[in-house]
Image (cartoon, helix red, strand yellow):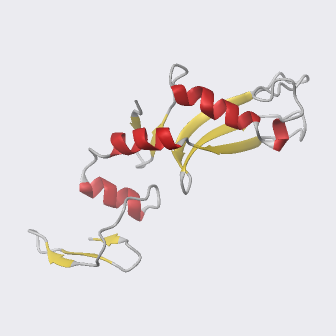
């Protein structure tokens, strides 16, 4: 089950455990990238000079939910490389279930910061809150308070 990790700056991330089904799915997807295909173990790509290999960094919102991998010194490019692999449809459901309990205010904050897309209400609305602040949703779906 997806478990949320929240950080002080409002980022929401997930870290996949090696015992989760998604672990094998995401590493297999990493091996499919052209940069890795010419290696006997494309999910490792160990550089013989430095010993560096692919490392799993996090699972976060990068315009969509993706797993991020880093190689500090890829043997093909001799440079630092990052690859972001889309999460599986099955894991997207787990993420959604983990995010559902978040408060509406926190969801608005994440949405406005571009850190995650929560489906906006279908019609722009205007209403008064109990503190007399006006809350509305513009045509693009952004929340304002």
Name the spot of residue 129 as percent of width and height, x first: 13, 70
Q: Is residue 120 above or below residue 64?
A: below
Position of the N terminus, as image quadrant, is top left
Identity of the residue furthest to the front in this view: 90
Relative placement, left or right, of 30 versus 9 is right
Position of the C terminus, as image quadrant, is bottom left
Where on the picture, by quarter, is residue 42? Answer: top right
Where on the picture, by quarter, is residue 27? Answer: top right
Q: Is residue 7 visible?
A: no
Name the spot of residue 128 as percent of width and height, x first: 13, 76
Question: Between residues 18 and 92, which one lies in front from this camera angle?
Answer: 92
Name the spot of residue 106 as percent of width and height, x first: 30, 53
Q: Can residue 78 be seen in this view?
A: yes
Q: Is residue 75 above or below residue 121?
A: above
Residue located at (41% from left, 38% from top): 94
The total number of labels drawn is: 0
Question: Between residues 50 and 99, which one lies in front from this camera angle?
Answer: 99
Relative placement, left or right, of 14 versus 100 is right
Residue located at (34% from left, 66% from top): 120
Name the spot of residue 86 as percent of width and height, x first: 60, 46
Identity of the residue furthest to the top in this view: 19
Relative placement, left or right, of 84 versus 14 is right
Residue located at (11% from left, 74% from top): 132
Identity of the residue furthest to the left in this view: 130
Residue located at (83% from left, 24% from top): 46
């Amino acid at each position: 089950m997806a478990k949320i990790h929240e950080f002080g700056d409002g980022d929401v991330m997930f870290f996949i455990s090696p015992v989760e089904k998604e672990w094998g799915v995401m590493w297999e997807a990493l091996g499919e990238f052209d940069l890795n295909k010419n290696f006997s173990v494309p999910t490792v790509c160990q550089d013989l000079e430095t010993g560096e290999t692919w490392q799993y960094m996090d699972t976060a919102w990068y315009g969509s939910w993706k797993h991020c991998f880093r190689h500090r010194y890829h043997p093909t490019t001799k440079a630092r490389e990052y690859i972001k692999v889309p999460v599986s449809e099955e894991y997207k459901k787990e993420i959604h279930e983990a995010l559902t309990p978040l408060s509406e205010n926190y969801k608005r904050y994440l949405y406005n910061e571009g850190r995650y897309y929560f489906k906006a209400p279908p019609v722009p609305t205007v209403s008064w809150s109990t503190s007399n602040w006006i809350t509305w949703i513009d045509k693009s779906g952004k929340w304002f308070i």
